[in-house]
Image (cartoon, rainbow, N blue to C red):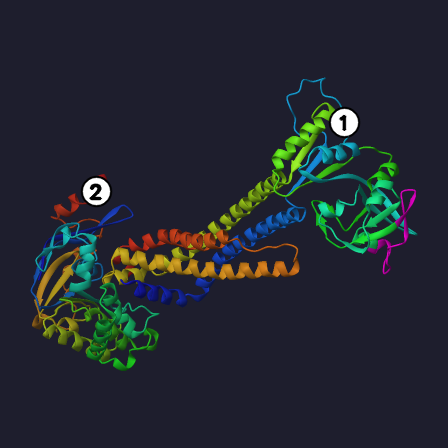
Amino acid sequence: MIRLQGITRTFFVGGQAVHALAGIDEHIRPGEHVAIMGPSGSGKSTLLNLLGCLDRPTSGTYTLDGREVGSLGESELTRVRRHLIGFVFQSYHLVSRLTAEENVELPMIFAEIPRGERRRKVKQALEAVDLTDRADHRPDQLSGGQRQRVALARSTVMGPRILLADEPTGNLDSSSGAQVLGLLEDLNQHGLTLIVVTHDPNVARRAQRTLVLRDGLIVRRLQAHEIGNTLPFEDLPSEAAATPPDSPPQGEEGSVEASPAGSES
Amino acid sequence: MKGTDRLRFALQALTRHRLRSLLSLVGMAIGIAAVIVLTSLAEGARRYVTQQFASIGTDLLVVLPGRTETTGAVPGNVGVPNDLTLEDAESLKRSIPAIEISVPLTMNTETVAQGERRRQVAVLGSTENFLRVYSLEVGQGQFLSTQDAARGGSVVVLGAATARELFPGENAVGKVVRIGSWRVRVIGVLASKGAQLGINMDEIAVMPVATTMRLFNRTSLFRILAQLSPQVEADETALQVIEVLKQRHGEEDFTIITHDAVLSTFASIMNALTFALAAIAAVSLTVAGVGIMNVMLVSVSERTAEVGLLKALGAGPRQILGIFVTEAALLSTAGGLCGLAFGWSIVALTVRLYPALPASPPTWAVVSALVVSTVVGVLFGVLPARTASRLDPVEALGKG
């Protein structure tokens, strides 16, 4: 489903090269449930954006469903995002002026699905997250858990193959969080590839496996039973964490060459 | 994204930011209202002038003494122009069949007094045909008769305002007024007509032309007005007039104005005025457009996170562009329509207050104002919309 080979992503902040991803190799099979953990600035979100085709790697190849993402044009990327990928965010990202059902309808409007079919699918999607009675409420009239469930309905209404969730339970109390996680797992049971970025070991433990990121590299690959109650990166040696983010890690020549700013110094 | 969906989405976005939308809408509306009002006034002025000319007939030749155009004459060869005389006026009528009537005209300013009341009035000397050439009517009494004109009797016909001021609340007909040192009998009062070709016909006094020549001790005429027979070429007749007068004067020391020439001169002046006003209006439209651009720019930067989200949800750059351009177009069109209504009511109010000014918005102004408002809105909306469509979804989402 997803194959990453030597993925780097370099940003330039005030003329300085920042290597958010420094060489990622990974394979994620269809229907897998994968968690991504790591301290802030470790590259989790950058990786998620790359996986979601919101961003392109500086170097390396990303193959999604047999297609090489780097070679796709803007309109093809848009189509991939539209049909293959669903997003769920920590802060829901609902459009506040639109009702729950209008928010869920939005991706189908961009896909130019006929109105009648849209109605039907919106109804189904809201039913699936048990919010039929809140269809005409705006986000500010909904609780956090309800908002995240609307966002979940929106992310799955196009029937994507992959669901990318960035701290989906980060803003929720435990019971709402459990409800959202339950829904995510249901979807995963039905064959949806699920990738969850999280800080919460309890969330990570429910994934089949967990990737631990640090300084733009995967430093650990853990099975669910290997995750304890502490964060799986707190025991790592601290020198790596002390490395300033703008100085590239040792042995990552590829990413240095890819940054024109690096040659100036 | 289908048109109706885009429209709905844009409308929802606009109604959410009510105040901001309203402000830019007002900006656009003022721009359009300015176009409508300014062009209406210019159009009103143009029609007013045209009406003025229409009231004296299209078949009129005016002869005035002296050349108004400079010619390449050798210095020293230029004499003092001969006066236009009563004989000139009569000979025109005699020798040119195309001229139906020929009306001599003198004009002097003199004090007209009745008891203690005095007025400075334009005293015109003319004949019984004066009424016809200027399309005037008599209100009370009668106008100069053929005999009055021939005899040069001491009679006067007063303009409506002059009569009212000299004889407040009284009938002036039959009374005596003093013009200069002369005592003159009022035989009639003109019906009110207002200003015409720069002369306020309500504030004149008309006497037989021979009487004014004696009164002011002059033999020269101010103008000769020649009324042409119907279906006569004014230009051809003008040439004949030039021939006759040249023979009499020995040189071309007079100027002939045809109605058409005057009208076209005025028309070109009014057109220039209209275009100047349209240019001013265009500036206000541009300002309104910049206002819309500002609103859209603010809207884009405020909604960066939303743009990122829409991209994540599968909106392409073209769709994002479409959304923001549609918003701008909606704003400017709505502003245009409001401005149209606003401008129109101002014009209606003006016409109500000054009925003499036939102001009404020209069709071209209405159409172009609406077209331009939409085009300006879209053009100025495209820039921010492009900014939006090019936003990097990752950075955009990060701001949310």
Residue B259's x, y, as percent?
Answer: 64, 40
Q: Work out whether residue B335 or residue A91 is closer to the camera in this orientation and state it.
A: B335
Q: Work out whether residue A212 or residue A169 is closer to the camera in this orientation and state it.
A: A169
Indicate the chain on which mark 1 is placed: B
User: To which residue does mark 2 refer?
Assistant: A260
Characterize the local packing of mark 2: few (<14), some (14-19) or many (20 or more) Cα atoms within 10 angstroms. Answer: few
User: To which residue does mark 1 refer?
Assistant: B82
Q: Is residue B141 above or below residue A260?
A: below
Characterize the local packing of mark 1: few (<14), some (14-19) or many (20 or more) Cα atoms within 10 angstroms. Answer: some
Residue B367's x, y, as percent?
Answer: 46, 54
Q: Work out whether residue B106 or residue B243 is closer to the camera in this orientation and state it.
A: B243
Region in magenta: B164-185
In which quadrant will I find the N terminus of chain A?
bottom left
Q: Is residue A44 visible?
A: no
Q: Is residue A33 above or below residue A11?
A: below
Nearer mark to the viewer, of 2 and 1:
1
Q: Is residue B346 left or right of residue B285?
A: right
In which quadrant will I find the C terminus of chain A?
top left
Q: Callout 2: helix, strand or loop?
A: helix
As shown in the figure, which amino acid type bears the numbered disc 2?
Answer: Pro
Please tell me in which quadrant of the rendered image residue A125 appears.
Answer: bottom left
Residue B288's x, y, as percent?
Answer: 47, 53
